[in-house]
Image (cartoon, rainbow, N blue to C red):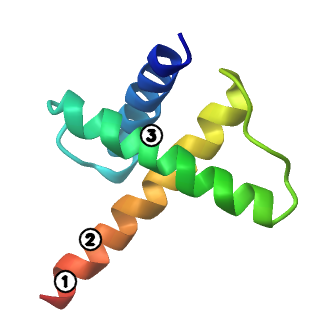
């Protein structure tokens, strides 16, 4: 059941991050991967800053996932410009 929650939270946070950053809205697989990876990155940063751990399916977890996914999208765009 946790895996399904990760996918749902990942898809939702990836979609929100893509919307915020102006990315194509039609690729659900990208949204899921971006959201789950953003959740891991955002969660690691939140824990290292002392903001608390990301646990469960709640608004705090969604916010951290969206922020992490936005940071990943920003990094991707910066790397694309360097090519």
Task: Tell me the CA gap for discs 3 and 1.
Answer: 25 Å
Please state, as top left, top right, bottom left or bottom right, where the C terminus lies in the image: bottom left
Mark 3, secondary structure of its residue: helix
Marks 2,1: beta carbons within 8 A: yes
Mark 2, secondary structure of its residue: helix
- Drawn side of residue 57 relative to residue 28, left or right: right
Image quadrant where residue 10 sits? top left
- Drawn side of residue 70 relative to residue 34, left or right: right
Q: Nearer the viewer, residue 49 or 82?
A: 49
Mark 1, secondary structure of its residue: helix
Q: How far from the left and from the top, in percent, is residue 42?
A: 60, 54
Residue for badge 3: 36
Q: For the point 29% across and 69% down, which residue is it?
A: 76
Q: For the point 40% across and 46% down, which residue is it?
A: 20
- Drawn side of residue 20 relative to residue 82, left or right: right
Q: Nearer the viewer, residue 1 or 69?
A: 1
Q: Is residue 32 above or below residue 56?
A: below
Query: Which comes before the other along the chain, label 3 or label 1?
Result: 3
Circle on res. 81 = 1
Q: For the point 63% across and 39% down, which residue is it?
A: 63
Task: Tell me the CA gap for discs 2 and 3.
Answer: 19 Å
Q: How far from the left and from the top, in percent, is residue 77?
A: 26, 71
Residue for badge 2: 77
Q: How far from the left and from the top, in percent, is residue 34?
A: 35, 45
């Amino acid at each position: 059941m946790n895996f399904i929650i990760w996918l749902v939270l990942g898809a939702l946070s990836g979609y929100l991050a893509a919307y915020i950053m102006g990315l194509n809205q039609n690729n659900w697989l990208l949204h899921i991967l971006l959201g789950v990876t953003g959740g891991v990155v955002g969660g690691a940063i939140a824990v290292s800053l002392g903001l608390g751990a990301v646990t469960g399916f709640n608004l705090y977890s969604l916010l951290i996932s969206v922020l992490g996914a936005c940071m990943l999208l920003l990094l991707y765009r910066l790397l694309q410009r360097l090519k």
